[in-house]
Image (cartoon, helix red, strand yellow):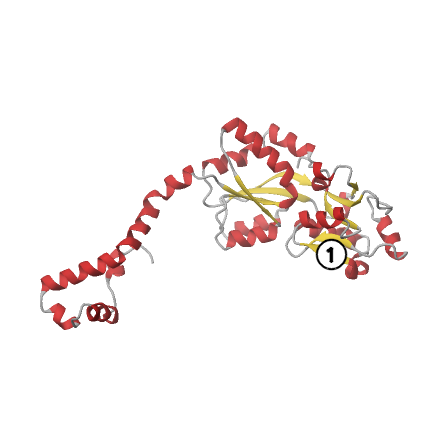
Amino acid sequence: MTLSSPIKQLALSNAALIKFSTVAGMTLAQYKKSSATFSRYCTLVLRLIKNRMLGYFFLILFAPILSATEIPVIAAASNIKFALEEIATAFHQETGKSLHISYGSSGNLTRQIQQGGPFELFLSANTRYVEQLYQQHKTLAQGQVFALGRLALLTPINSDLLLDDQLNGLKNALQSGQLQRIAIANPEHAPFGIAAREALQKQQLWDAFQAHLILGENVAQATQFASSGAAQVGLVSYSLALAPALKNRVRYALISDALHQPLQQTAVLLNNAGDTAQLFFHYLLQEKAQGILSRHGYTTP
């Protein structure tokens, strides 16, 4: 129902009028014999839809006030979770403003935004999904790269697999039959999965690894597979490899960034972004936030 023409909304079909008049025990013709009676009939109809109409008017009149007082929902790629939580804490301490953050793969979050998800700011692990939303007129601008992510090779700490930045150890382990399971994020919708696929393709290992892949819904899940031993090794986010929870539990090695396209962490304000979301967008580019990102394994763009 739209409110662009309230008169049209009140113009019920004859079938609907007959239905209401039957409930009242009269025919439509009998109602029309008396303008006063017909007026009372219209009043009855108005009462029936009054609550819905008031609800729509309430949303139109007060939506700006409600959104200004609500905590904005941020959609963020899962690779940035630990860095972003620290940044959000610092932001709250400095501004008194809070955020609600929803994590997932960049592709899945993009789909949620396209379907009308209540997000005000999107932090993607690459530029591709932001550009897609911009082309679909879902954003206020083209977005801003605020950090560069890194890909890492990660195994449980007791693994004897050789880890190196060119993936030579993986190749040797596969050829010797030592390697059976490797975890990556699903490249269909996760930028770190795309980067992992590119690195394996660059070293001509992608086809050989097809039967050995375990796909995580996002890079956080792929990291969980590798760190828990569900997979013997994972190509995951360097930032997640540095997570305090994994200290003394895993070994890792940075992968050469020449093996894949840059993992450009990109922020973009969505069309319904309020003041707090816009403030946080700019906060990400400031020295304090950039220092936190650096400690979590990100580099400046």
Disc 1 marks a residue whose amino acid type is Ile
Is 77 above or below relative to 294?
Answer: below
Pick the residue in front: 246 or 116: 246
Pick the residue in front: 220 or 25: 25
SS class, disc 1: strand
Quadrant location of residue 283? Answer: top right
Q: Is residue 301 left or right of residue 37?
A: right
Determine which residue is flagged by label 1. Answer: 214
For label 1, the crowd category at 10 Å Cα-Cα, with few meaning under 14, some 14 to 19 and many 20 or more, is many
Q: Position of residue 277 (x, y in %)?
A: 50, 38
Residue at the right extreme, as displayed:
176
Q: Position of residue 131 (x, y in %)?
A: 57, 49
For the point 11% across and 63% down, the residue is 37
Q: Position of residue 72 (x, y in %)?
A: 48, 40
Q: Position of residue 276 (x, y in %)?
A: 48, 35
For the point 72% across and 52% down, the residue is 184
Is 242 above or below relative to 105?
Answer: above
For the point 63% across and 42% down, the residue is 265
